[in-house]
Amino acid sequence: MEIDEFLALVKKRRSVRKFKPDPIPDEYVEKILEAGRWAMSGANGQPWEFVVIKDQKTKDKLGDAVFEETKLAAAIELSRVKEMRQPWMRGIPEVIPASVWTEAPVVILLCADPRTAQASVLSRVFDDRWIIPENMAHTAQIIHLAAAACGLGSQWVTVTRVAEEILKPVVGIPPILRVLSLVPLGYPAYKSEPGYRRDLQDIVHFEKYDMSKSRSNEDVQEFIRSLRGHSRVQYPIYKQQ
């Protein structure tokens, strides 16, 4: 693959929040997971394990688990001024978005074994709060790129401690393992808009940090406000708290 082809793939990837019901070929799922298996990890500890979910009842239970955390997130988000809130949390406080990613034909749970931190140097073992999430971020990124290469959409669904303890029993995940994120996979039900990123010249420094590019607190706040204008709301289903 040439670098321009790779860049095209990176720019093609989108976070999709509504999927068609069309099934995904098992071959695609296997290749996506095979790609994730080859992610880099500290001292090659390879903490990842993947749980592939297709059963709708199970997906709905996972969605309910994440929804419990969403209620907490909504309560905190509503403390912001309206224009700074996530677009999908700008409704009245009594209504918050449901986990519509459960409509995806396939949902992959990304599990991590924190004991694999022992493969790294001892100082990392004492601070496995960082090495395990970093390792899992590597495999998650590759999985999302592989999905895009298959012509599929995917979504990055964060799993907090609140949701993790609720969803683990749903699929029988051992207590020792962590679940840090979910990846719904499917064909997008809408056409994604072009992605938005900061200009390269604004984020690259040569030899030393260019203070002329340093942002003030006000600059960062204004940047976040501008991000809200680039967000596309794809949460058509809502629940009462």
Image (tube, helix red, strand yellow):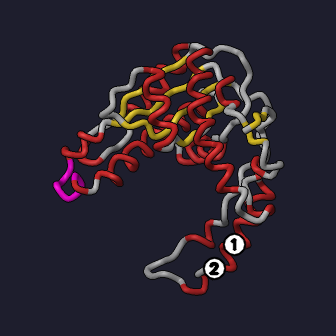
Is residue 207 rendered magenta in the image?
A: no
Give the quadrant of residue 51. Answer: top left
- Eyeballing the image, is 222 above or below 3? below
Q: Quadrant of residue 77?
A: bottom right
- Residue under pointer 2: 217
Magenta segment: 120-125
* Residue corresponding to mark 1: 221
Q: Could you tell me which residue is drawn at 24 percent across and 45 percent down?
A: 117
Q: Helix or strand or loop: what does disc 1 sit on?
A: helix
Would residue 119 appear left or right of 200 to someone viewing this image? left
Residue 160 at x, y = what percent? 50, 44
- Marks 1 and 2: CB-CB under 8 Å? yes
- 8 vs 231, nearest the viewer: 231
Q: Residue at left 22%, top 55%?
A: 126
Depth check, front residue: 233 or 4 = 233
Say which amino acid is labelled 2. Answer: Asn
Q: How far from the left and from the top, in percent, is residue 131?
A: 32, 51
In this view, 237 is above or below 55: below
